[in-house]
Image (spheres, grey):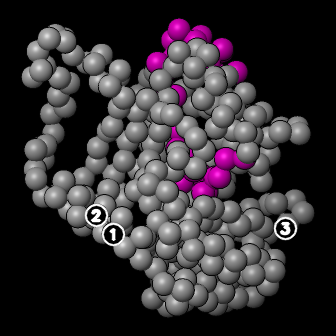
Amino acid sequence: NAQYGPFTPGFVEVPHCLEYRAQWDCDNYGVRAAEAIEEVILREGPDTVGALCLEPITAGGGVIVPPAGYWEKVQEICTKYDILLHIDEVVCGVGRTGTWFGYQNYGVKPDMVTMAKGVASGYAAIACLVTTEEVFNQFKDDATDPLNFFRDISTFGGCTAGPAAALENMRIIEDENLLDNTLAMGARMMGNLQALSEKHAVIGDVRGKGLFLGAELVSDRKTREPVNEKMAAAVVADCMAQGTIIGMTNRSLPGFNNTLCFSPALIATADDIDAITDSVDKALTKVFG
């Protein structure tokens, strides 16, 4: 709020589902985290909630992979209270997790899906919203008029370069089997990061899916005290100096801007993956010893 406020009224936050930073002591953390969303809905009043917006895997909060049972319960809650499920695929969408869309990993049936980054892999600025026919029809004033539809005014709306790049990008992903490559290289990178965690005590947790991974840095594994964000930033900077671009969390979770984030290209090779984690290894050694 200090950085971006005041916020637009009418939007209510729900708790995150990061089990590594457990907020509840329970047997099935995924279900409990979803039930926390239901508690917010009941607090606000189900009739006042139009849609629930979630990422399949939360990016800004530190590559938060939902625990087992989470998404099934979320879908059940949305159905129970007649709430639209809006899936934000801006980061996860179009191959990043090894499926076309992140929600496909969990058997979810969304009402709306937003996507952007992976749609054209950065070769053109393009974003889009996809809805079910049922949702789309609600924006029609006259169902008998085929030209009657919801129109969003946009400066670059109707520009053909973005869609052309998107179609070619998705053709290449399909023709070159890049979803399979994402799964294979993601598994390799996960293994490399786990090996680094055995070498560097500062790595408290490694998580991710496909080529979307994170390594959370802590000053103490037992207490899970996060490292100062300046230390995490120093690791990112050292990797950059080595010619390797990695990221880190934003401040979605205040005080926990301590996770290194990795999103290699879907065409990454085994040598590319090893080069990335080798840079991280050297950076961690330089910053933390």
Q: Is residue 250 magenta?
A: no
Compare residues 112 and 58 and report the one nearer the observer: 112
Q: Quadrant of residue 145?
A: top left
Horizontally, residue 99 falls left or right of residue 28, namely left
> Type of residue at label 3?
Asp
| Residue 156 at x, y percent in the picture | 12, 47
Tell me if label 1 and label 2 are in contact, CB under 8 Å: yes
Percent of width and height locating residue 258: 65, 63
To which quarter of the image does residue 24 belong?
top right
Gap in Å between the C-alphas at discs 1 and 2? 6 Å
Direction from residue 75 to residue 202 in the image, left or right? right
- Residue 85, placed above or below residue 17: above
Q: Position of residue 173 (x, y in %)?
A: 36, 66
Q: Which residue is mark 2?
A: 171
> In the rendering, which numbered label is found on residue 175?
1
Q: Earlier in the sequence, mark 2 or mark 3?
A: 2
Determine the secondary structure under disc 2: helix
* Mark closest to the chain's N terminus, 3 or 1: 1
Q: Which residue is mark 3?
A: 220
Residue drawn 24% across and 53% down? 126
Residue 89: image location, x then y, percent: 44, 47
The magenta segment: 39-67
Observer-nearest of 76 and 205:
76
- Which secondary structure, mark 1? helix
- Where, by quadrant of the figure, is residue 221 drawn? bottom right
> As drawn, is 191 to the left or to the right of 1?
right
Amino acid at pointer 2: Arg
Q: Is residue 114 visible?
A: yes
